[in-house]
Amino acid sequence: MAYVNPSGEFTRDQRYISTRIAADGPYPVEAGRYRLVVSRACPWANRAIIVRRLLGLEDALSMGVAGPTHDERSWTFDLDPGGRDPVLGIERLQEAFLARYPDYDKGITVPAIVDVPTGQVVTNDFAQITIDLSLEWTAFHRAGAPSLYPVSLREEIDKVNRFVFTDVNNGVYRAGFAGTQEAYEAAYHRLFDRLDKLSSHLSTQRYLVGDTITEADVRLFTTLVRFDAVYHGHFKCNRSKLSEMPVLWAYARDLFQTPGFGDTIDFVHIKQHYYVVHKDINPTQIVPAGPSLTNWLDEHGREKLGGRPFGDGTPPAPISGFPRFA
């Protein structure tokens, strides 16, 4: 399975299933009806894991976790007994896509939400999934759930999300999957130019938009948390490590140490995914032993900028087992 575009610039296939789960839609919001399928390795899925946890949707929306690696067919449930998801009863996420679209020819991606009664995928539109968890699933939010997409900040959040996606979230892939020197250098400079601008912006305020955590912070975090472990070396985004960019490093540690963020992170899965799956970049499939990642727990000092992580809400209850460093 090839990822690098030999002719130059990497272009992401963004043909997602746009069906929405909404209070008044053909797939109505119902507790227990749907299953969120993720991989802890994937940054796009990591967003949904974080938002589900921050909003307290664990009891309403179950979660199936695929293993960190996959082949050209799809993600597999090799972490579960017998290699089958215990709720959906399938070995591969591909089965849920084909159950709805027998001739499906696009990417089998996570996050995906599956309708449990029919076994059919509903959506894999990662950007819309987290917005809908905030806006459509309010009846099942926990008491004290934060407002991640408030009306008063929505326009600014959308603006920030657009350039963060283009230059950072997808920017690391544009560098890593570039097939020519010119395409790589263009992506490299665009990425670090944006990171420099974000550093300047975050030097005077604790969060990207407003004084609380929003959807924008979730989206930036999932790239930053993978930066030193994967993108710096594997994707050649090596002007600086995140840990060498003081403002962004402190900002990322602040989020990492906030309940709902770092406790979703599995660095073992993250490293295994990128270094094993991308065989055209890393043909040996050797997973690096480093870098040391326990520095994510170092003091960050961002409290001096003020801000209230959860606004008028409260943090989610603690969980055990994560983050997993090794």
Image (cartoon, helix red, strand yellow):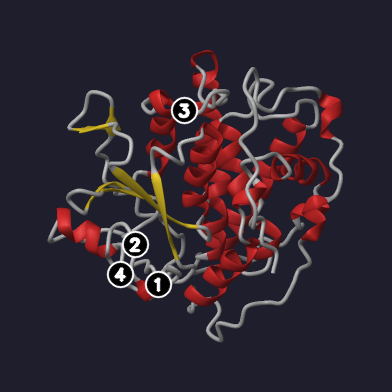
Disc 3 is placed on an element classified as: loop
Disc 2 is placed on an element classified as: loop
Indicate the position of residue 106 as horizontal and vertical percent values: 26, 58
Q: In the picture shown, does residue 266 fall above or below 180?
A: above
Q: Tag 4: Cα neighbours inside 10 Å, few (<14), some, or many (≥20)?
A: many
Q: Which residue is mark 2?
A: 86
Indicate the position of residue 194 as horizontal and vertical percent values: 65, 42
Disc 4 is placed on an element classified as: loop
Residue beneath the point at 46% across and 71% down: 69
Which is closer to the viewer, label 1 or label 4? Answer: 1
Q: CB atoms at circles 2 and 1 under 8 Å apart?
A: yes
Using the image, tell me which numbered label, if any, was put on residue 81. 1
Labels 2 and 4: the sequence-earlier one: 2
Instruction: Tell me the distance, in whole angstroms, between the alpha carbons under discs 1 and 3.
Output: 30 Å
Instruction: Tell me the distance, in whole angstroms, between the alpha carbons under discs 2 and 3.
Output: 25 Å
Q: Can residue 203 be seen at all in this image of the molecule?
A: yes
